[in-house]
Image: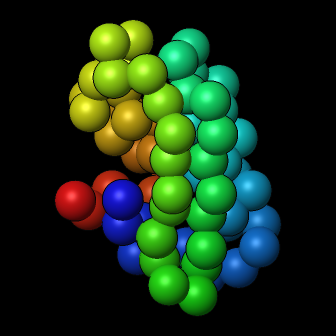
């Protein structure tokens, strides 16, 4: 996933924490330098809308 508006380590932590609060998300790893987030999750428990909502609620933008 692309989250292009991350600019620092704090941004990475905010995005990771927001995603990992969702039931079904096993792991997330954000990298502000590339603007990408690697995510491991159960697709039967987490929807794209859930992911987008968590990222936007944390104050960032999800690009696919």
Q: Is residue 62 above or below residue 41?
A: below
Q: Is residue 41 left or right of residue 44?
A: right
Q: Is residue 62 left or right of residue 59?
A: left
Q: Is residue 58 left or right of residue 14?
A: left
| Image quadrant assignment for residue 43 | top left
Which quadrant of the figure contains the N terminus?
A: bottom left
The percent position of residue 47, horizontal first and vertical second, equals: 29, 23
The percent position of residue 52, horizontal first and vertical second, equals: 34, 40
Residue 5 in sight from this viewpoint: no
Which quadrant of the figure contains the C terminus?
A: bottom left
Q: Residue at x 40, y 75 (%)?
A: 4
| Image quadrant assignment for residue 45 | top left
Q: Residue at x 46, y 70 (%)?
A: 36
**Colour logic:** rainbow
Q: Is residue 62 above or below residue 42?
A: below
Q: Is residue 40 above or below residue 15?
A: above
Q: Residue at x 52, y 18 (%)?
A: 24
| Image quadrant assignment for residue 63 | bottom left
Closer to us: 3 or 25: 25
The percent position of residue 12, horizontal first and vertical second, equals: 67, 64
Question: Furthest residue to the bottom?
Answer: 33
The percent position of residue 25, horizontal first and vertical second, equals: 55, 27
Q: Residue at x 62, y 30 (%)?
A: 26
User: Tag count in the figure?
Assistant: 0
Residue 45 in sight from this viewpoint: yes
């Amino acid at each position: 996933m692309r989250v292009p508006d991350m600019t620092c380590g704090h941004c990475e932590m905010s995005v990771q924490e927001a995603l990992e609060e969702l039931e079904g998300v096993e792991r997330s790893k954000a990298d502000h330098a590339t603007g990408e987030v690697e995510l491991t999750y159960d697709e039967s428990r987490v929807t794209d809308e859930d992911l987008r909502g968590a990222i936007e609620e944390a104050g960032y933008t999800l690009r696919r």
